[in-house]
Amino acid sequence: MNAEARLPVGQRVILKIIRDGKPLEVPTVLKPSELRQLSGERLDPRLSGAQFGDLPDKYTREGVTGVLVTRVTPGSKAEAAGLKKDDLVRGINRAEVGT
């Protein structure tokens, strides 16, 4: 078991820090250290060649939902469909995409 599996990922925790010799408590929520990735072909054959990932924190802090296109293979079905790296996918067939 790795250290991350033992931590309360997704739960509120208090970090106790000593700064300049003084104790400081910082409330925070631990997040997984790696972004999750999903191959487009697992979703639909027309998305073959695309890789999707979770949004960076800069988006989620602003309340944006969806997934990010992290890679598109040249000459793939995904490229032919018009997907490009760093596209933000917020919905599919009029249904909002959460994560």
Image (cartoon, helix red, strand yellow):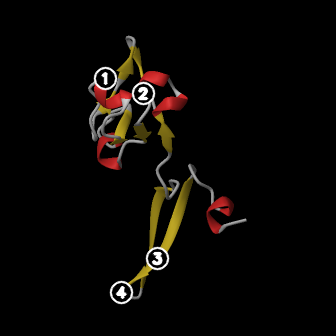
Could you tell me which quadrant the N terminus lies in? bottom right
Q: Earlier in the sequence, mark 3 or mark 1?
A: 3
Q: Residues within 10 Å of mark 2 (few under 14, many from 20)?
A: many
The disc placed on residue 20 is 4
- Disc 2 and disc 4: Cα gap in Å? 53 Å
Residue 72 image label: none
Label disc, if present, on residue 47 of the rendered structure? 2
The residue sitting at the right extreme is: 1
Q: Badge 1 is on which residue? A: 81
Kind of residue indicated by mark 1: Ala
Disc 3 marks which residue?
Answer: 17
Of labels 1 and 2, earlier in sequence is: 2
Q: Quadrant of residue 13?
A: bottom right
Q: Residue at x 31, y 23 (%)?
A: 81
Q: Are marks 1 and 2 in contact (CB under 8 Å)?
A: yes
Q: Nearer the viewer, residue 94 or 77?
A: 77
The local secondary structure at tag 4 comes to: loop
Residue at (30% x, 31% y) in the render:
79
Q: Amino acid at mark 2?
A: Leu
Report, in whole angstroms, how far the alpha carbon at label 3 lies from the one at label 4.
Answer: 10 Å
Query: Is residue 82 positioned above or below 85 on the image?
Result: above
